[in-house]
């Protein structure tokens, strides 16, 4: 995992989602937010954001992950 990628385990799974990953998109300069049931398996969803902050805000709003978890 690089400095641009951060993975967070959800203390309480939301539906099938147990892990979230924020990853920098080198092509666009934006950020992806991925949701996984298990790491190493295909993601359940992904969303693209212009900024890391926007991806973190979605993680906070949808899954209750505070911004401090991504540091």
Image: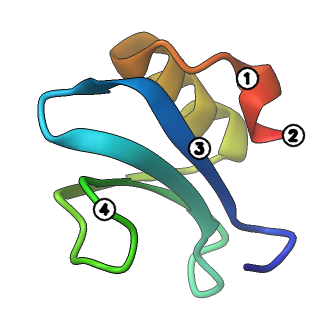
Q: Is residue 59 above or below residue 6?
A: above
Q: Which one is in front, 32 or 68?
A: 68
User: Quarter of the image containing the C terminus?
Assistant: top right
Q: Residue at x 52, y 56 (%)?
A: 21
Q: Are marks 2 and 1 in contact (CB under 8 Å)?
A: yes
Residue matched to label 2:
71
* Crowd band around label 4 with a 10 angstrom C-alpha radius: few (<14), some (14–19), many (20+): some
Residue matched to label 1:
67
Label at residue 39 = none
Give percent across and percent down for residue 51.
66, 46
Q: Which one is in front, 54 or 63?
A: 63
Question: Distance of mark 4 from mark 2, alpha carbons?
Answer: 21 Å
62 left or right of 7 in image: left
User: Quarter of the image containing the N terminus?
Assistant: bottom right
Residue matched to label 3:
8
Question: Distance of mark 1 from mark 4, alpha carbons?
Answer: 22 Å
Which residue in the rendered view is the most extreme toward the bottom? 27
């Amino acid at each position: 995992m690089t400095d641009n990628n951060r993975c967070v385990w959800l203390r309480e799974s939301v539906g099938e989602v147990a892990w979230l990953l924020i990853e920098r998109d080198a092509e666009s300069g934006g950020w992806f937010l991925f949701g996984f049931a298990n790491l190493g398996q295909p993601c359940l969803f992904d969303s693209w954001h212009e900024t890391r902050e926007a991806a973190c805000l979605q993680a906070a709003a949808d899954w209750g992950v505070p911004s401090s978890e991504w540091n």
